[in-house]
Image (cartoon, grey):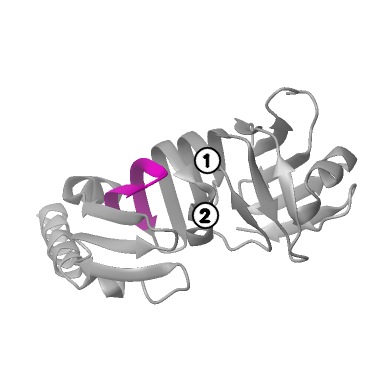
Amino acid sequence: MIVFVSVGVLAYLIAMVATMPASVLIRNRDWRTGISGTIWNGEAGLAGGSVLSWQFAPLRSLTSLGFAIDWHANGADTDIGGRALFRPGRTVLDHVSGSADASLIKAIQPLPFDCAMQMHVEMPRIAIGGGDSEMEGQLATDTGSCVGANGIATPVAPLVLTAEPLGQETRIRLTPMAQRRRELVRATLKEDGALSITMTQAGAAALPFAGVPGGSTIEAGL
């Protein structure tokens, strides 16, 4: 009886939250150009012309004890989608697949440079928070260019980013597509969310717009 009552209360709370306006979920940001619908079923315009839409997944929300959605981003150079699960202090993206313009990165993580290139993404799982952070999958780019804080554009050859969980951490590597053994950037994501990123000498030469000296390491937390 307690289990059934608890599930019923949870279902009621989820339904009540899901019918709120979408603006409650996605507030004003530089990358947002407009928003409509509800948390249950809504969409938001993104800088660059793409549209992010989502559909609430009630059954998955109940079984995962969180707020689950199916999402899709579509635009002139973007067609990518997947699933997401949100809990306090934890976000999980899975089955992320498709292609996207690099400008979509701004909606995820602002960076000190802008890139014009196409990305092809196959990420079975991205989990941040909750004590078991990890990433798995691959992101490949086409030929493009990036502009750093100095306003100078740098041509960028096709790149490949791979993420592989190994034990209690995830190893991440960024390499040229034509030279998979030549590391430009290497990173380690710990289960507790600690992220260590190292720019190699080769990376500093190939990616000067990043503004990170070769051999330096950046420590961050996700």
Q: Secondary structure at mark 2?
A: helix
- Kind of residue at badge 1: Gln
User: Hey, which quadrant is residue 88 in on the image?
Assistant: bottom left
In magenta, the rendered stretch is 66-86
The residue carrying mark 1 is: 118
Drawn side of residue 62 relative to residue 91, left or right: left
- Kind of residue at badge 2: Ser
Mark drawn on residue 103: 2
State the separation of the CA atoms marked 2 and 1.
Answer: 9 Å
- Where residue 198 sits in the image (x, y, percent)? 80, 47
Drawn side of residue 124 relative to residue 3, left or right: right
Would you say residue 79 sits in the magenta stretch?
A: yes
For the point 79% across and 33% down, the residue is 183
For the point 33% across and 63% down, the residue is 45
For the point 11% across and 59% down, the residue is 8
Q: Quadrant of the N terminus?
A: bottom left
